[in-house]
Amino acid sequence: QVQLVESGGGLVQAGGSLRLSCAASGIFFSIYAMNWYRQAPGKQREMVAHITRGSSTDYADSVKGRFTISRDNAKNMVFLQMNSLKIEDTAVYYCNAKAWTHDHWGQGTQVTVSS
């Protein structure tokens, strides 16, 4: 059974930092590209950060220079370090694993940035 479990969300003041973690089980983790998405109330889900099997990364323009995605294949985990958080970063953040036709999602973790 595939499981992606996010953790690390919470309430933080603008300018602060959070580190999200996603623990994967039931998949051959190292062959998957891993992604972080987010969805704010009333908005569409958007990709925030992407990391390939080979650890190449890409980011949404809105988070470039502030967020860093990384992975630990030995621990089947992916991380999202979020610095200089802004109020507009408030959203539910989802971990996603993709490989060919396989597409798996976590349940999400809430990140709330206050002024």
Image: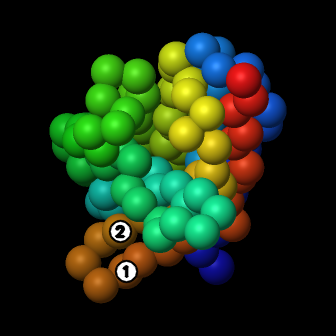
Q: Secondary structure at mark 1?
A: strand
Q: Which of the pair 55/38 is nearer the observer? A: 38
The residue depicted at 60 percent of the width and 15 percent of the height is: 15
Q: Are marks 1 and 2 in contact (CB under 8 Å)?
A: yes
The residue depicted at 61 percent of the width and 33 percent of the height is: 87
Q: Secondary structure at mark 2?
A: strand
Give the numbered dot on residue 4. Answer: none
Q: Residues within 10 Å of mark 2 (few under 14, many from 20)?
A: some
Measured from the top left, where is residue 51 in percent x and y? Answer: 30, 45
Say which residue label 1 marks: 102
User: Which image quadrant is residue 42 in?
Assistant: bottom right
The residue depicted at 65 percent of the width and 20 percent of the height is: 14
Q: Which amino acid lies under the numbered mark 1 shown in the image of this protein?
A: His
Say which residue label 2 marks: 98
Above or below, 30 against 67 in this view is: below
Measured from the top left, where is residue 19 in percent x and y? Answer: 61, 28
